Image (tube, rainbow, N blue to C red):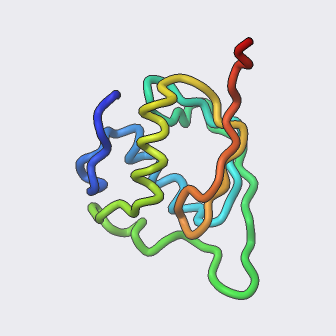
């Protein structure tokens, strides 16, 4: 990877595009143990997902799931920029709200 993420789904690498679809289909969830390799999210093996159900209101997939291309929101772009800096690692917990990365906990090796 190492490249700056683009602002359109069509312009991002396939593994990132797959991840965008993955979180949009779930819309509200927590992803546990997401592996990051070469700046890209790894969905094989599939991380553990805890679905969140929002009351009141829809908790189903985002409407963008049906679109071939759309502009990525700033939360997604910032998430991909973080992955570019991380390169390789593991996100212990990633909270998804409204189909977008909201908050995460990243595992790091402690440095003396």
Q: Which is nearer the eye, 110 or 80?
A: 110
Q: Which is nearer the eye, 41 or 110?
A: 110
In the rendering, at what x and y percent does residue 5 appear?
A: 31, 44
In the displayed image of the protein, which residue is found farthest to the bottom?
Answer: 56
In the rendering, at what x and y percent does residue 64 appear?
A: 40, 69
* Residue 27 placement, left or right of 19: right
In the rendering, at what x and y percent does residue 100 appear?
A: 53, 61
Q: Is residue 53 above or below residue 111?
A: below
Q: Which is nearer the eye, 22 or 83?
A: 83
| Residue at position x 34%, y 39% in the image | 14
| Residue at position x 51%, y 29% in the image | 86
| Residue at position x 46%, y 31% in the image | 85
Q: Is residue 98 above or below residue 68?
A: below
In the displayed image of the protein, which residue is found farthest to the top?
Answer: 112
Q: Which is nearer the eye, 46 or 71?
A: 71
For residue 44, which quarter of the picture? top right
Quarter of the picture containing the N terminus is top left
For residue 39, which quarter of the picture? top left
Quarter of the picture containing the C terminus is top right
């Amino acid at each position: 990877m190492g490249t700056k993420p683009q602002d359109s789904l069509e312009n991002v690498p396939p593994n990132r595009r797959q991840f965008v679809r993955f979180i949009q289909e779930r819309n509200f969830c927590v992803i546990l143990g997401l592996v990051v390799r070469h700046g890209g999210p790894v969905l094989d093996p599939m991380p553990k997902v805890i679905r969140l159900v929002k009351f009141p209101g829809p908790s189903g997939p985002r409407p963008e799931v049906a679109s071939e291309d759309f502009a990525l929101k700033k939360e997604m772009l910032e998430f991909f920029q973080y992955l570019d800096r991380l390169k390789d690692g593991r996100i212990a917990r990633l909270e998804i709200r409204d189909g977008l990365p909201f908050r995460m906990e990243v595992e790091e090796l402690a440095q003396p």
